Amino acid sequence: MKAAMRRLTIALSLSVAFAGGANLARADEGMWTYNNFPKQAVGKKYNFTPDDAWLKHVQMSSARIAGGCSASFVSEEGLVLTNHHCAHQCIAQLSTAQKDFVKSGFTAKTQADEVKCPEMEINQLVDIVDVTDKIRAATKGLDGEKFTAARKQAESAIEKEMCGGDANAKTRCDVVTLYQGGVYNLYKYRRFQDVRLVFAPEFPIAFFGGDPDNFMFPRYDLDMSIVRVYEDGKPAKMDHYLTWSQGGVKPGDLTFVSGHPGRTSRQLTVAQLEYQRDVALPERLMRLAEMRGMLTEFMKRGPEQKRIATDDLFGVENAFKALKGRYEALLDGALMAQKRADEEALKAKLKKKGAAGKAGLEAFASIEKAVKTMRLVHKPFDYIERGLGFGSDLFGFARVVVRGAEERPKANGERLDEYRDAALPQLTQRLFSKKPIYDELETLDLTFALTKLREILGADDPFVKKVLGKESPEEMAARLIKGTKLKDVAARKALWDGGKAAVEASTDPMVVLARTIDAEARKWRKRVEDEVDAVYRKGGEQIAKARFEAQGTSVYPDATFTLRLSFGTVKGWSQDGKDVDPITVFGGAFDRATGRPPFDLPQSWLDAKARLNMKTPFNFCSTNDIIGGNSGSPVVNQKGELVGLIFDGNIQSLGGEYGFDESTNRAVAVHSEGMLEALSKVYGAERIVNELRAKKTAAK
């Protein structure tokens, strides 16, 4: 890891030295917005220049799964391809002790067999509009609380203007902050909330190799699932979707990844990175490690406990490994030294400008001050406002109905962000979801959260005393879970529809708890929004201006879980003096199988062995720049055809949060030929295969 970080440091240094188009000739770096994609630079390097029609087609064929994943439309009838781990929550929610689709897989033999996911929402980006001038005009000369209020009002007005008041179950508009506040874009989405499961393989083949192979390569995973979006009870008609390629990819082929990277920190200041290194990441890792131990022990209680906790454990283990890689990257002295050198170089340029550079210099100072504030308030903010001290689905329902009663009567621009019109359909979909609630797991989660609340804030903290009284965390959790009626969707709906009067009259113990702590939680939220977030945005705007003067917008913004396009090639790398081949084949999975978890192939694969072509490409890696959130992203070729499905990165890529090293950073994908081979010869899913291979009915 340290050697990789040293290479990353060199890459960062060169990126600064050759800012703009020149660095594109050196490395396949960047998660580019579609309205600022470096077409000419790609054309110069690869002799292929994506035109506007190509970009529009790939953009419209891409999809976002609300909550943290990517996907793509792959048929005219609304089929959507994503990862198994992106649909895992849906698969688990549809499972029962009698029919465990996580364990046995799921294939809808007919369209009537496709089953609705309780909570999944899929978005299609249809338009991007630059609204920077409007936001800056609204916030000019303002700071702190006034800046935050003005920004929210402006964003609300823009979203209403651009969507024509049409933010609803079919449309979503979001103002997106780019370049740490240097640019604001309005993203307009077509929203799908009727999403139905079509296909999912068994968990052992979707995550073959388990945690030992996570973020490793070679890989042999069928980490795929297929869902379908519906409108008005019928499969949605898609004007744009990705057709399946003939043959997929081979080493050296040019590839594009269109997806929604969640977050990068490549443009953060040193003070912000130090906060991540010293506070945020260590605390998150410690909590995840404890949760992993708790869930592992819980799953040993019996087969049903193992079934209902598998999804949670999978998420915890994946998050722990990813954050551990980021933490190790920030512990690398050379990386931080390079970040400091880059920042000091920019400050030196600003000092030479005199009065013209004053705002930029002050921005660095104000952000450093805000970081100090965050160090002081992060514990109560995390555990009271962010809810880490009350972690359970049932408390989440209670908070939504309590806050909804307070927020919904307000003007749209005055509400908390998650209660604005654009967000309400997703919020209510989850609130009224019929997903199963398991009392035993809820009690475990709430006991853990309340125990951590007492540990982190202290047993003598007035807020902790107010919450727990004389009860232990175990006693309180058991009482709340047993006494609440929020497991019933009808009870949640009655509180939501009844508004403030119903919420204030409720004696439900979980609602009483959410109501009791709300004022304290809002206090910490307001302080962070006014004294930290507003400063980061305002300061980021000033620093972005300084960078734009030196580099223009020929650099890409940090990831924001909005649609981005990266480019690269199918390529291995050299590790410990050995070349890593970029493509694995089916035969490798059978060679690697031991018959014991996590290297156990499902019985369906063992039964199909004689039918399978062992030379069929299975997984491949490429130099595409990706990060968390890109899971489920389509890999496309120059023709705009689907050739792969991103599901991971190699261990070296975990430092991609802070920079990109083309020599070792690799994106890992399922090969398109491997997916078809498995669908056809293992699962007999010819209905799905025929739809994926169908030709477009007309040019649209």
Image (cartoon, rainbow, N blue to C red):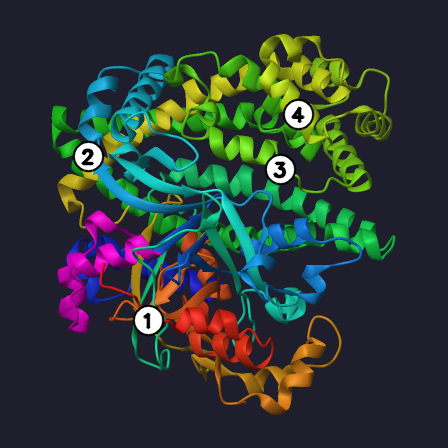
Q: How many marks?
A: 4
What residue does disc 4 label? Answer: 492
Give the SS element for disc 3. Answer: loop
Q: Is residue 46 rendered magenta in the image? A: yes
What segment carries the magenta color?
32-61
Task: Tell me: residue 556, above or below residue 430.
Answer: below
- What numbered label is drawn on residue 433? 3
Circles 2, 3 touching at the beta carbon (< 8 Å):
no
- What numbered label is drawn on residue 545? 2
What residue does disc 1 label? Answer: 695
Task: Tell me: residue 71, above or below residue 572.
Answer: above
Look at 59% across and 89% down and name the residue there.
611
- What numbered label is drawn on residue 22? none
Can I make out residue 659 in this image? no
The amino acid sitting under disc 3 is Ser
Q: Nearer the viewer, residue 184 or 653?
A: 184
Q: State which tag comes first along the sequence, 4 or 1.
A: 4
Q: Tell me the chief SS of the magenta region.
A: helix
Circles 2, 1 touching at the beta carbon (< 8 Å):
no
The amino acid sitting under disc 4 is Arg
Give the SS element for disc 1. Answer: loop
Look at 27% across and 65% down and name the residue there.
27
Judged left or right of residue 233, residue 350 is: left
